Image (tube, grey):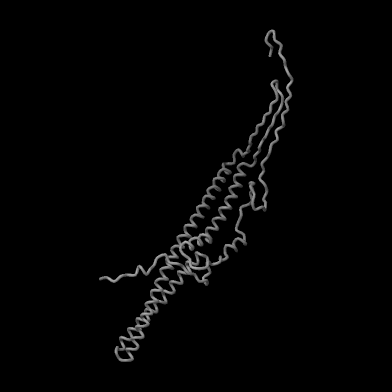
Amino acid sequence: QPAEAGKQLKVEAVEKTVEEPKPLKIAVPEKTNEKKTNKLIYSEPRTLNKSALKKMDTMPQAPAGKLDVTDCIVRAVDVSLPKEIGQYRQKMYRWTLTKAIRDLFPEATFYFIGESGRLSNGKYQDRHYYFEVKQPMFRGFQLVNTVMQEKYNRRSAIEEVKKAVNEAIYETLVSYFELTRADWVYKNHLELKKQVDQLLEQSASKKEKGIISEIEYLNAQYLYAEVASRLENLYGEREMAAVDLKKYLRISPDEPIEITPIYDYKSYQPQPID
């Protein structure tokens, strides 16, 4: 541009050095055996191997001492097989979601550019950077739909874990209260059988002395047989309730189990009606 009249334009040479852009490509690392890493790692969807299945099928060690309702719930949730399977599926869908995102954005580049030089008023420096992502232009929305599908699959796996935990709690509570009820009824009939035994001994003694007739003695024997049969059935019900609870606690059926009842059933004994 022309200078103003009467003035002379002074032009200084300016040195400017511009660094060439150095793109930093972010590549997805290959599969690694490291346990802990902060890098984005993708591997093929994991499946339950034989060692994991064997570990899940192994009976955990039975807890010692009496178990209350809280102990039963905590153990049932910890050893729940549906919960463990849901957690494995949740991890698997996390990796498949990572692969789907990587396929949607197959390449990402980070650019960092630095400039420095001299101007008429001094030196200057400039630094700027930007991020570039490449994406397939059109594939029938297949990649986007795959990402959305994997997201919903992972959410579904999370909900399945929650459902498994709730079902474990519910089934454990039902089995716990059923075992408590069966044990109380069985012990109550044990006390009744002791009274019937005494009644039968008294009836036998009276029959020998001729105080009661044969029919009355047979009635006493019938009452004894009925109580004994009922006691045998209650014992089977109690054992079945114990096996049912052991199933949710993953305790071997051969191992004994003791529980602490929540309620004191003696305070709920029926009172005679006046």
Q: Nearer the viewer, residue 186 or 148?
A: 186
Image coordinates for residue 227, horizontal then vertical, percent: 37, 78
Task: Say left or right for 193 vs 55.
Answer: left
Task: Say left or right for 49 vs 21.
Answer: left
Image coordinates for residue 16, horizontal then vertical, percent: 72, 25
Q: Residue at x 44, y 74 (%)?
A: 236
Q: Residue at x 73, y 27 (%)?
A: 17
Q: Nearer the viewer, residue 274 or 193?
A: 274
Q: State which quarter of the image contains the C terminus.
A: bottom left
Q: Residue at x 38, y 77 (%)?
A: 191
Task: Say left or right for 53 vs 8.
Answer: left
Image coordinates for residue 237, horizontal then vertical, percent: 43, 72
Q: Is residue 230 above or below residue 262?
A: below
Q: Where on the picture, by quarter, is residue 175?
A: bottom left
Q: Is residue 179 above or below residue 230?
A: above
Q: Is residue 195 above or below residue 36?
A: below
Direction left: furthest residue: 274
Q: State which quarter of the image contains the N terminus.
A: top right
